[in-house]
Structure formats: structure tokens, C-alpha cells
Amino acid sequence: MLRRLNYTDRKRINKNNIKISIIGEEDEEKSFRVFIDLNGLNLPGESIVYIEAYHRMMQSQRYAFGTVNRFSHPDDTSLGVLGLTANLKFRVLVVDENGKLLASAEKIGIETAVKEDSLLPVVPADLGYLLWNIKMEGEDGGPILELNERIPAIKTVAAHDPRFIHSVYPAVLREILTHMAVYLNIDLHSPDVDWQNNWILFSERIFISPPEGRYSDVKDDIIEWINGVVNAFSTSRKKDWNDYRLNRWDL
């Protein structure tokens, strides 16, 4: 049962500061990820952020996204029967500990759907004795993961072998976020192009929102955030450690 909220004196959240993307193929259960900017509303940092998905004729479903100061995606944002994305809408609710609604946004539509694997195109390449390489030559300068074509079944290894996943992907994630924050020096709350926004959404889904400001202004905070995202990714794959005995990790 959804908790009733007191709607008195609430602030309006600008819809332009909210981006919601659907994850999942046509034949899969859909889930979603969110990018939201609550800056400038002067909301208490410990206020709880909820996001509701709803169809006009169906009961809504509410998801807790941490607090204003520590916005974070829940482990499960699956939509279930709400996954019929035609006419699907969202609302954002910021609530204090007493249930008073402090801020909200209604009737939020869906951004262009983002496929999970579209984050990082994978291509074979002649890398000599390198196992992998990141090339920032995708669409709008986005990242492409090159894998050594001389290694048999390298794409299968990259997708399923926990040794590869735990040793390579954290480094890939760190390199991409560092490229965005340090080399490009973008504002992580206002990315320039879609691929940057998708990586920030992914990072928020597994960790928290990036700090305000650019690397040139808040470098220590951004480095700490990148470290947190990388650690959160490795933690999210902890099942690999349980599925494989240590003696199967011998090289």
C-alpha cells in the first residue's frame, strides 16, 4: 500500500531536469533508469526521493531512490505489468520524514529507450599483445571496447568469464568516467551528448549521483565518486565470486 502524502506548499521540479530511460528488449521485462537534477530547490538533504511509474487505468508503483543528498537507484527498477511503455508516465516525489510532500513533478514521459549493451559497443581488433583497448571514436566521440581478435572466442570470454569481468570492466569503467570528467572536463550533471548521459545514468543506477561542478573545480570529489562507482560495479558482480571456486581462477 502506497503511503499517503501531504501535498501542502510543495515545490515544482522542472521536467527538463528529469530524464527517464527504459531498459530492455521488446521480449524482456522492462526496467528504467533516471537522471534528475534537484539543485536550486533548497530541499533538505535527508528528504526521501520517490519515483512512481503509472498508467492512467492501472495502479502506480513506487520506487525509493535514496535521498536528495544521496540519490541512488534501487537494486530493482523492474516495471512488471507496467512495462507496456505506451502511455507510461512517471512522477517524482520528494518527501520529508513526516510524509509531507516537499517537491514534485508529474506526467513525465520516457526518453528514447536505451539498450543495456548500447553503452559499450564491442568490436574485434588487431591489438598485438594487448587484451583490450578503449577507443573514443564511437558516435559523438563515445567509447568502443576493442578486444584482441587473435584470442579465440574473446567476445564469449568478455561476456561470461568472471576473471575477465572483474579484472577488465572496472578498469574500462574507470577509464571512461575519467575521460569524461578529466579529459573532457564536462559538467556531469549536464552532459553534452547522449553517450555521456547514458554512462552517468548507469553510474547513478549502481552508485549515487556525481558531485556538482567540473573536475577543474572539485577534482577530489569527482575522483572519490569515480572510485565509488567502480567499487559499486565490482560489488554488483559479487555473485561471480560465489559461482566460481577459487581454484578455477588460476591462470
Image: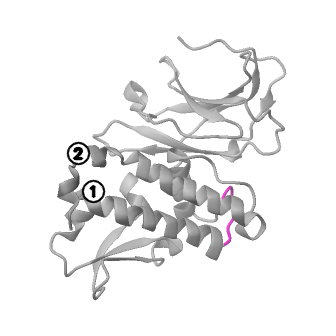
**Disc 1, SS:** helix
Q: Is residue 187 magenta?
A: yes
Determine the residue positioned at 74% across, 23% down: 96
> What span is in magenta?
185-190
Instruction: Indicate left or right for 190 with 145 as reference.
Output: right
**Disc 2, SS:** helix
Check the image and report above or below for 7 versus 198.
above
Image quadrant holding the C terminus, namely bottom left
Marks 2 and 1, how far apart at CA = 9 Å
Residue 197 in sight in this render: no
| Residue 206 marker | none
Instruction: Indicate left or right for 238 with 20 as reference.
Output: left
Determine the residue positioned at 70% across, 54% down: 211
Check the image and report above or below for 114 versus 29.
below
Per the image, the residue denoted by label 1 is: 162
Residue 242, image x and y in percent? 27, 43
* Marks 2 and 1 close (CB-CB < 8 Å): yes
